[in-house]
Image (cartoon, grey):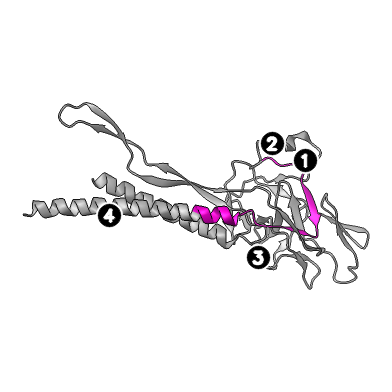
């Protein structure tokens, strides 16, 4: 009976974690470039059951469920037209590189950028958009009349080449950590990112085992922003399913604890 109580309790814990994950996805359904998350679970190592009298094996028994890994869904979301010259969207594989305030480089699909008072391209947090050489992109402090960003990442101001923008993808087996909803980084400083703009002309881009998902040729689209890839309808349905799973484990736990209490009361008679 104690094994059953433990299994029900770990089931409740797993469904609680899933509820928090789904709530996080729902809260970011309108966040530009947000990528949904999911958890995978595994059972604890099975224990062998043996008849205590005959010694005959009776089979295996799991003691419950535990979290196995967190998975990011990097699938392409729809693009929304804004008409703003510094709103950018990635069509295909890859992320925009950002320089954080602490000097680290993070990666995002949220392409809502502006020009700060010093002439650099920044996001809403004042973090620099980086070029192909991972340096901040300087547009100029005055006289920016015409800003054009080509689909290959070439940035032109007033008809002159200013910088080359590239997008980067995480290798398939890389550790990935999410920051503030729309930003990602690898906690391993030795991770080598894949420059997805460099392989646009190669066939390897179509079925590259290093990528987290297969994608067509990567391009940058000016005047558009990528939406969140969260489906509000599906996520709401998942929320209901998880709540029912939690309640089922909760009822099973109550039945077992009530039965255990009854046995203890009988033993005290």
Identify the secondary structure beneath mark 3: loop
In primary-sequence order, the first of circles 3 and 2 is 3
Crowdedness near tag 3: few (<14), some (14–19) or many (≥20) residues, C-alpha within 10 Å:
few
Q: Tell which tag, 1 or 4, sits nearer the viewer.
A: 4
Q: Find residue 254 and name its label.
A: 4
Of the image marks 4 and 2, the number of the one nearer the N terminus = 2
Residue of label 1: 199
| Residue corresponding to mark 2 | 208
Q: Give whichever of discs 3 and 4 has the lower sequence position.
A: 3
Residue at left 91%, top 68%? 145
Quadrant in the picture for the C terminus: bottom left
Task: Indicate whether 46 appears above or below 91.
Answer: above
Give, as a single range, the part of the protein colored magenta.
214-238
Point out the frontmost of discs 1 and 3: 1
Q: CA distance from mark 4 to mark 2?
A: 50 Å
Mark 1 or mark 3, earlier in chain = 3
Q: Are marks 3 and 4 in contact (CB under 8 Å)?
A: no
SS at mark 1 in the image: loop
Tell me whether circle 1 and circle 3 mark residues in contact (CB < 8 Å). Answer: no
Q: Position of residue 170 (x, y in %)?
A: 65, 46
Tag shown at residue 109? none
Residue that badge 3 annotates:
101
Residue 135 in view in this figure: no
In the image, 120: left or right of 125?
Answer: right
Label 2 Cα neighbours within 10 Å, binned few <14 / some 14-19 / many ≥20? some
């Amino acid at each position: 009976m104690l094994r059953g109580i433990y299994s029900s309790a770990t089931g409740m814990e797993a469904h609680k974690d899933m509820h928090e994950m789904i709530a996080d996805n729902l809260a970011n359904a309108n966040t530009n470039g947000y990528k949904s998350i999911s958890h995978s679970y595994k059972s604890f190592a099975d224990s062998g059951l043996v008849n205590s009298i005959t010694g005959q094996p009776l089979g295996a028994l799991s003691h419950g469920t535990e979290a196995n890994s967190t998975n990011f869904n990097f699938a392409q979301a729809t693009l929304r037209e804004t008409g703003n010259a510094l709103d950018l969207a990635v069509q295909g594989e890859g992320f925009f590189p950002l320089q954080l305030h602490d000097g680290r480089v993070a990666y995002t699909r949220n392409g809502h950028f502006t020009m700060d008072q010093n002439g650099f391209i920044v996001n809403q947090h004042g973090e620099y958009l980086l070029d192909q050489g991972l340096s901040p992109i300087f547009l100029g402090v005055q006289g920016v009349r015409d800003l054009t960003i080509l689909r290959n990442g070439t940035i032109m101001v007033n008809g002159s080449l200013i910088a080359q923008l590239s997008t980067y993808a995480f290798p398939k087996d890389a550790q990935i950590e999410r920051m503030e909803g729309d930003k990602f980084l690898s906690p391993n400083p030795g991770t080598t990112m894949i420059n997805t703009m460099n392989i646009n002309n190669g066939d390897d881009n179509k079925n590259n085992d290093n990528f987290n998902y297969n994608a067509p040729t990567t391009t940058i689209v000016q005047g558009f922003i990528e939406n969140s890839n969260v489906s509000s309808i599906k996520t709401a349905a998942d929320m209901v399913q998880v709540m029912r799973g939690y309640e089922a484990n909760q009822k099973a736990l109550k039945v077992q604890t009530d039965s255990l209490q009854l046995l203890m009361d009988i033993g005290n008679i």
